Image (cartoon, rainbow, N blue to C red):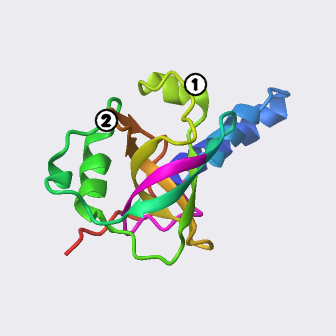
Amino acid sequence: MFRTFLKSATIAFTLAGTGVAVAPLAALAHHGWSSFDTSRAYYIQGTVTDVRWGNPHSEVTITVDRTELPDGFRDRPLPQGANAQEGAETMASARAYEGEHEEIHLTLAGPSWMSRWGLDRPLEAGETIEVLGYLGSADSDDLRPVMFWLEDGQGVWQQLTAFPTSPEPAN
C-alpha cells in the first residue's frame, strides 16, 4: 500500500506542477483501510435500520442479531469482483464479533462500485444482511465490510485498495 501511496503522491506532485487536477488521486487515498484494524475480521448478521446511499461512501446502520459464524461459512464462494488472495485471507480470519455494541455503523462503497459488484439498488431498512469486515481502530461500533451477503445469498465485494496489515487466521 505504501508503494501505491508513494506512486500516487509522486504523480500528484508532478501533475500539480503542470496545473492538472489531482482530486481523483485524493479520492484514491480516501478509500483506504488505514483507520480500520485489518488484522482480524469480524462476522455480524444484522437488520438494517438506517441507510444513507451515496458518495463518497454509502453508510448503513445495523442492529446486531447474530455473531456466531454459520456452519460452512468459510467455504462460501467469494462475491463477484473479489480479490482471491485477500478475500481468502479475510475468510480465514473470520471470527464472531465479541463487542458490546447492539448497533454497528457500516462504511460501504459508493453506489457506482456497488453496481459494478452486482448490487444495483440501495439497501433498505428491515433487510437482514451478513457482514464480514474490520472494526475501526478508534471506534469499535464502526465496521468496514470487505464483503456482505443479502438475504437471498448474493455476496457483494467491498475492497478497492490493499490492507495495511494482513489478516491473521482465526484459531
Badge 1: how crowded within 10 Å, few (<14), some, or many (20+)? some
Q: Which label's residue is closer to the chain start, 2 or 1? A: 2
Q: Nearer the viewer, residue 116 or 8?
A: 116
- Residue 71 lies left or right of residue 61; in this view the side is left
Seen in the picture, residue 74 relative to 157 is either above or below; the reply is below
Badge 2: how crowded within 10 Å, few (<14), some, or many (20+)? many
Answer whether residue 67 is magenta in the image: no
Quarter of the image with the C terminus is: bottom left
- Residue 70 x, y percent position in the rendering: 22, 57
- Residue 132 x, y percent position in the rendering: 38, 54
Can residue 112 be seen at all in this image of the molecule? yes
What secondary structure is found at the residue carrying circle 2? loop
Q: Quadrant of residue 110?
A: top right
Q: Amino acid at mark 1?
A: Ser
Disc 1 designates what residue? 112
Answer whether residue 35 is magenta in the image: yes
Disc 2 designates what residue? 79
Q: Amino acid at mark 2?
A: Pro
Query: Residue at coordinates 53% horizontally, 47% vertically from top-left?
Result: 48
What secondary structure is found at the residue carrying circle 1? helix
State the extent of the magenta-drawn residues as a range: 33-49
- Residue 89 lies left or right of residue 10; in this view the side is left
Query: Residue at coordinates 43% horizontally, 45% vertically from top-left?
Result: 128
> Residue 141 shows which numbered tag?
none
